[in-house]
Image (cartoon, rainbow, N blue to C red):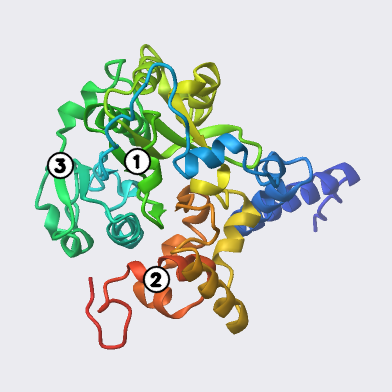
Amino acid sequence: MLLAKPSSPSTRRRRVVIVTTVVTLALCAYFWHVLYNVGDWARQTSPLSYQYWVQQEFVSTKSELDCFYGRTPLDATTPTPPEPIPNHVHFIFGLANPYEDPHAGTFDFIAYLAVRSAVLGIRADKISLHYTYLADPPAPEPNKDPFSNPWVNRLKDDITLVYHSPEEMNALKNQPGAHWQPAHISDILRLRLLQEQGGIYLDLDAFGLRPFTDLLRSPRDMIMGHEGGNRGGLCNAIMVARKNSAFIERWASEYNDVDLSREWNYHSVLLPKQLQMQNPDEVCALSPSALFWPTWTFSHVRWMHEPLTTHQARVWAAEIESNGGSLFGEQLAYHAWSQMSWDKYLSKLTPEIVRSRDTRFNLMVRRFLHPDLGVQGGAQP
């Protein structure tokens, strides 16, 4: 009888390494989302993280408060007050087709709440929803029955739909055939809309909490809010502008011959801050608290969506009421930072949850629900 030759120690070690590696890779694959979330949490909460600079405390400056309360003085080139900026809110959605790319998503409950905030919070005179694709279920054709989307249908009495063809949107690219994300095309479209019509621009994860009355009578043709306590940028998710703004013309020209596929927020956040510092008389720059506070950091997003005790809910409800709809006295809007908050928080919200569960976010947007939504026996969208 032949006996198996004993394996050498090196062979046994090699087998152990192979088995251990395979098991480790299998466990990593199985627990990938958990490991990713833990790693992301560690990265965001590390003392060395940039997020500590973003969420640092700040004090509003005199010029920021003057901008907020409509006290910005006229400059030498504007001897008389200009016409008020129109109380016209612009939204953009559906530049990518979810029929071809499901990640593009359809106009949803959060977008509905954002538009309702323009109705009830800002009390806009006009609301325009600019789109290419709105159908739900998604359709291959652009401009296919936008009111088939139940949330858009809910808003039909409050909005004006403005269709933009795929050809028109592709023409906004300064490099033919460039693989830009829809967000980059939206960045250019929003500047064009404000330059041609004036008004207020909101992303569909931004919520107007109070009327922008004082901002609309600013002598400056452009009003933007600082992002972060470090004032590292001026964010384009919420903007107020008079048409034919010199600042927008200057900003838009910076998009010429630029490959936006290689960047994310330089042209939308960092560049406007640089241009504002070079041309301070063209922009009314608001404190971080006005439009973009709390910020996008891990702890700030969690703070907005964490469950409240009965006592905390009562205190915050009273604070919101005393501030006319805002969490803080110097706040006009809130940007929900969907890139950071969608998977864990925003995607899970329903009318019933917003109506019944007390978080700071839910308390703030609850009044934007139609009365028959989120109640027992109430209507569906």
Out of 2 and 181, give the one closest to the viewer. Answer: 181
Q: Residues within 10 Å of mark 2 (few under 14, many from 20)?
A: some
Q: How far across and how far down the image is residue 287, in percent? A: 56, 41
- Looking at the image, tell me whether mark 2 or mark 3 is earlier in sequence order: 3
Q: How far across and how far down the image is residue 3, in percent? A: 83, 55
Please give the name of the residue rendered at 51% of the width and 47% of the height, measured from the top-left corner: 290
Label 2 sits on residue: 366
Q: Residue furthest bottom?
A: 377
Q: Is residue 189 above or below residue 14?
A: above
- Three-letter amino acid code of the residue under disc 3: Val
Label 3 sits on residue: 162
Q: Residue furthest top?
A: 257
Q: Is residue 208 above or below residue 88?
A: below
- Looking at the image, tell me whether mark 3 or mark 1 is earlier in sequence order: 3
The residues bearing labels 3 and 1 have C-alpha atoms spaced at a distance of 23 Å
Left or right of 230 on screen, residue 366:
left
**Mark 2 touching mark 3, by CB under 8 A?**
no
Label 1 sits on residue: 216
> Between tags 3 and 1, which lies in front?
1
Out of 209 and 80, give the one closest to the viewer. Answer: 80
Q: Residue furthest front?
A: 79
